[in-house]
Image (cartoon, rainbow, N blue to C red):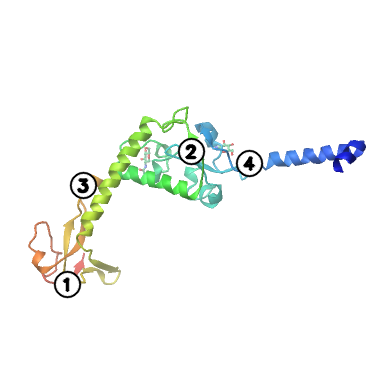
Amino acid sequence: MVVKMVATSPLFLGLAVSVALVALLRQFSVKQQTPLQSKLWNTEELAMYNGTDDGFPILLGILGSVFDVTKGRSHYGPGGDYHHFAGRDASRAFVSGNFTGDGLTDSLHGLSSTEMKSVLDWRGFYFRSYTFVGKLVGRYYDSQGNPTKYLKGVEAKAARGAQLLEKQKKEEAKLPDCNSRWSQQEGGEVWCDTGYPRLVQRPLEIAITGKMSRRCACFKEEELGQAGLELYEGCESLSKVCPVK
Ligand SMILES: *[C@@H]1O[C@H](CO)[C@@H](O)[C@H](O)[C@H]1NC(C)=O
Ligand SMILES: *[C@@H]1O[C@H](CO)[C@@H](O)[C@H](O)[C@H]1NC(C)=O
């Protein structure tokens, strides 16, 4: 019936056309809010989605994967703590925390295997929490959208980092942790529910961070003769509680 009216009334036809036109224009203007199609991005395009324009989605790249983070505008928009990540791939800054100048790079050159794992974990977070909208052509994806050697290298090194951490966790699980507390007035102390507190080298720590690091673990009396255990300064051999300076 509508069709017949349109066909018979020139006035109505004009009205129908303008209604359609308005609808089309509206559709065009809200296009920015409709979900972005997954595609290949380049650096310049991505830079437009930096969150400064309220009408635009906010995008972020990590390891060359691009995500729509608009729903996190308070974090990624101007003034937000993560605004530095908007409109670019600043993969390195996820672990370096360096948001100045060249710190905002997608290069992971020189990072350790566990730091690379950490960047990969962040990418996992974005896959779980935000919408994937494509790949950034450059360091991590070629112009066909295939992963580059660089990305494969990063993923391989991150996998080694994950193995190291897993191994460390297993090693550390063999030795129960001390309890600890610290207060401004009384300072710190460590104690064991069963056994005696000793300082021990964290296993694999050199391989993981390049530095030595120690932790407090609990040992039974018959284990106290083992090599590598250090008594807390100012603590008796069989004290259950030791002060920490
Ligand atoms: C940020 O995005 C706006 C458009 O949303 C663009 O005009 C501006 O040039 C971008 N800024 C940078 C630094 O790329
Ligand atoms: C951040 O990175 C830039 C460029 O690599 C460097 O010049 C600057 O010293 C770094 N800042 C910090 C706090 O590490």
Of callouts 3 and 2, which one flags the residue occurring earlier in the amino acid sequence?
2
Whether label 3 touches label 2, CB < 8 Å: no
The C terminus - image quarter? bottom left
Of callouts 1 and 3, which one flags the residue occurring earlier in the amino acid sequence?
3
| Residue nearest the viewer, comparing 27 with 5 | 5
Question: Does the rendering let one see residue 85?
Answer: yes
Q: Which mark is residue 240?
A: 1
Q: Alpha-carbon neighbours of circle 4 within 10 Å: few (<14), some, or many (≥20)? A: few
Kind of element beneath mark 4:
helix
Residue at left 17%, top 58%?
Answer: 200
The N terminus - image quarter? top right
Q: CA distance from mark 1 to mark 4?
A: 64 Å
The x, y position of residue 128, in whole percent, is 46, 49
Residue at left 17%, top 72%?
Answer: 240
Amino acid found under the numbered disc labelled 3? Ile
Q: CA distance from mark 1 to mark 3?
A: 29 Å
Queried on whether the Cβ of the residue with tag 4 lies below 8 angstroms from ligand 1, the answer reads no
Residue that numbered label 2 is attached to: 88
Residue that numbered label 3 is attached to: 206
Residue that numbered label 4 is attached to: 32
Q: As displayed, is residue 168 above or below residue 7? A: below
Amino acid found under the numbered disc labelled 2? Arg
State left or right for residue 125 relative to residue 178. right
Kind of element beneath mark 3:
helix
Q: CA distance from mark 2 to mark 1?
A: 53 Å
